[in-house]
Image (cartoon, rainbow, N blue to C red):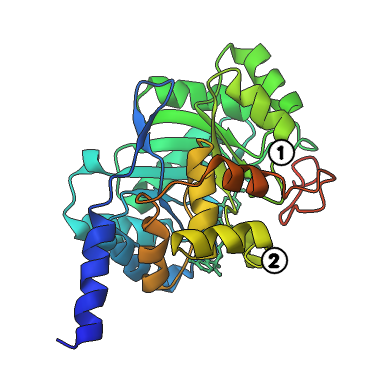
Amino acid sequence: MSEHHADHRADEKAAGSARIPAVALRSGYDIPQFGYGVFKVDPGQTERLVSEALEVGYRHIDTAAVYGNEEGVGRAIAASGIPRDELFITTKLWNDRQGGDQPPAALQESLEKLQLAHVDLYLVHWPAPANDQYVNAWTHLVSLNEAGLARSIGVSNHLVEHLERIEAATGVLPAVNQIELHPAYQQREVVEWCAARDVHIEAWGPLGQGKYDLFGTPAIRDAAASHGKTPAQVVLRWHLERGNIVFPKTVNRDRMVENLQVFDFRLSDAERDAITALDPGDGSGRVGAHPSELN
Ligand code: NAD
C-alpha cells in the first residue's frame, strides 16, 4: 500500500469513528446531526456512492422520491449489512402526490424502492401552495406516523404561514423543517418560529450548493486558516454549532471524508459571529426555489 493510500485509509477511519451527535426529535427518536444527501446524484451511481458514504461512517441518508434514486439507496443499505436501527433514512413526498389518498401509496412506493419496512423520517417536500394540498398531505403523514411507517414526520421548505396552517389543522407540529440555509441565506423568521416550538432545522444546500462564493469570503477563509481546516469544514462546523442538522452532498469520496471531519475543532464566538454576519438580509443569497413559487 502506498504511503498516500495508507494516509487516506487512516483518514477514513478517523472520519468513520467520528462521534456524530444525536438530536432528539419530538417523536422520541434521535436523528444523527450529520448525514449524506443525494440530491442530483445520478441514479446509476447512487448505490456505489451511498455504499462509500456508509463505509466512511455516514449513517443518515437524505433522499426523496423526486430524486429518482431511492432504489440505489435501498440497494446500498441492503448490501451494507448495517443493522437497520443504526441507520436513519429520510425520504420525501413529491408535490404531485399530495392530494386525495395519494400520500400512503406514495410512501409505500418509496418503501419498496428503499427495501424498507419504515422510514425514519418522511417529509412533505414543498408546500406548493398554488395546489393547496399540503394540509391534506400533512394529515396523511400524521396517520402514516401513527401506523409506524414513518417513525418521525416533518416538512420541507415550509414558511411560517404554511407551518401555522398545518398546526392549526392537525394540532401536530413537524419534527423538522428542512429548508435552504447557509451563511448567505439564513431564513431567520422561520428559524425563530421553529426554534420556539422545538421544530428542528435541517439545512439543505448547507454549502450554498457551490453557487454562492461562500468559500472565498474572509470570515470563512480566515477561520479555515486558523484551524487548519477547509472552508467547507468551517461552514459545516458553523451549522453544527447553531444546532442545524446537515447532509452535504458530494460525489467525491475524499470530500465525503473531509466533510465528516468537523468534530475535532470549535469556532470561536468571534469567528461564528463573523460567519453569521454574512447574510445580506435581503434574500439575495438564496440559491434554490422560493417556497411560495414552486409547485
Ligand atoms: P450542498 O450545499 O450540500 O452543496 C453540494 C455541492 O457542494 C456539491 O455539488 C459539491 O460541488 C460541493 N461540495 C461538497 N463538499 C465539498 C467540499 N468538501 N469542498 C468543496 N465543495 C464541496 O447542496 P445540496 O446537495 O443541494 O444540499 C445537500 C442535501 O440537501 C441534498 O443532497 C439533499 O439531500 C438536500 N436538499 C433538499 C432540498 C429540499 O427541497 N428539501 C433541496 C436541495 C437539497
Residue 187 disc label: 1
Q: Residue at x 65, y 31 (%)?
A: 191
Q: Residue at x 56, y 19 (%)?
A: 173
Q: What amino acid is found at the position of numbered circle 2 in the picture?
A: Asp
Residue 88 at what x, y percent from top left? 34, 42
Left or right? Give the position of 116 relative to 269. left
Disc 2 secondary structure class: loop
Badge 1 local density, few (<14 within 10 Å), some, or many (20+)?
A: some
Give the Cα distance between marks 2 and 1.
18 Å
- Crowding at mark 2 (Cα within 10 Å: few <14, some 14-19, many 20+): few
Which quadrant of the render holds ligand 1? Answer: bottom right
Q: Which residue is nearer to you in this view: 96 or 228? A: 228
Q: Nearer the viewer, residue 112 or 287?
A: 287
User: In front here: 226 or 52?
Assistant: 226
- Using the image, determine if residue 103 lies above or below residue 115: above
Residue where numbered disc 2 is placed? 213
State the residue lying farthest toward the right: 282
Q: Position of residue 224 (x, y in %)?
A: 52, 62
Q: The residue under label 1 is which amino acid type? A: Gln
